[in-house]
Amino acid sequence: MIVLDLCERSFAVNGLAGIPLTKRVRHGGAAGTRRTQELNEIYVSGGFRRRLNPLSEAGCISQVIDLNVQLIAICNQHMRRVRIMLLRGQTAIVYGGSGAIGGAAAGAFAREGAKVFLVGRTLQKLEAGAEEIVRKGGAANVAVLDVLDERAVEHHAEVVARETGGIDIALNAVGFSHVQGTPLAGLSLTDFMLPIETYAKAVFITAKAAARFMAQRGSGVIMNISTPGSRLPGIGYLGYGAACAVTEGLTRLLAAELAPRGIRVVCLQPHAIPEALTKGSHSRRVFQPAAERAGLTVEEMLQGAAEGTLLKRLPTLGEVADVAAFVASARAHAMTGTVVNMTCGALVY
């Protein structure tokens, strides 16, 4: 950011002085010396092999810096390098890492400096996600396991904690096939209970496994995923709506219990995400029966959902992933026991 600051100030001063693309920079004293050294480091690392602003015996610096195309290129080149990474050096486990939301969130965590451990049931999808993270300069590992297998999840968390020194972030983004679109009269008890039981078990098992190691260091954040189905009334969503409400309730209860150990627990609540239909999500298969009952395609049904929001649209995977990275970071340390509304205004509370 020092280079950008220099660039902006130079243009402003030069404009007033009538000097095109140059500025006389003068720094004195210890503060000036430190700033000069910072400039030297950035310019040398960026390709300038000469030192800038050499110190005089009097401790003052006076150097004319030409701002040319190369400087602008360096500004752009180093934007990503010099920015602060929100999750640098942290360890994140993403359960459901082969899915649309889990994969997007894992990419955001890695982009912000975290080492990511992707957990899921489909090796090919997990490896594809990990390869994409590594290609972009991140670090990722994969593990194939069922999050409803408590022993397997606990063992995996233990291995991750031993390898990295601890667990900082645990995102439960798992999805399970279930029945939507069937009214009460035609809904079996088994189909009603399936999403409630599976999602509740996933929250419990993953949170318990991660909290064990977070508590040892007195810090960490656990995140779950819900939807506006927990609050929006609708025909045919008895089981899934109840499952979302259970997820949000468990988030609040876990937050209360784990807060004394320095662990935050937050629930992310995005609306349906259209692009997830082509990004490894099971959502098309789940939405299809409800769409057919309404005489619509899944895309048409989602467009109708978008029209019902204040913003007249639905969230994107990138938006959900960015919010997840923010919630996982120190900038969100005041947040726990809450539901982060990303429904584009479908819910207002």
Image (spheres, helix red, strand yellow):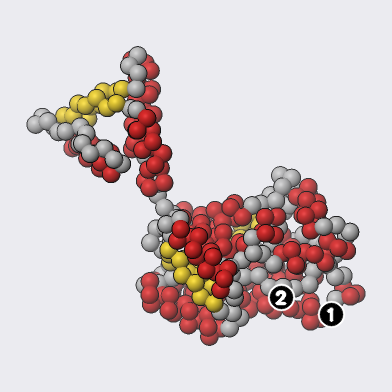
Q: Position of residue 150 (x, y in %)?
A: 56, 83
- Where's residue 256, x and y in %? 55, 69
Do tag 2 and tag 1 residues touch (Cβ < 8 Å)? no
Marking on residue 188:
1
Q: Secondary structure at mark 2?
A: helix
Q: Amino acid at mark 1?
A: Ser
Q: Is residue 178 left or right of residue 10?
A: right
Relative to 279, 80 lies left or right:
left
Mark 2 or mark 1: name the one nearer the start of the chain.
Answer: 1
Residue 16 can be seen, yes or no: yes
- Residues 129 and 37: in front is 129
Q: Secondary structure at mark 1?
A: loop
Residue beneath the point at 62% across and 62% down: 100
Q: Nearer the viewer, residue 267 or 110?
A: 110
**Residue receiving disc 2:** 196
Q: Residue at x 80, y 64 (%)?
A: 288
In the image, what residue occupies the spot 54% across and 65% down?
128
Residue at the left extreme?
A: 57
- Distance between mark 2 and mark 1 Cα atoms: 13 Å
Badge 2, how many Cα within 10 Å: few under 14, some, many 20+?
many
Q: Nearer the viewer, residue 307 or 45?
A: 45
**Crowd class of label 1 (few under 14; some 14 to 19; many from 20; radius 10 Å):** few
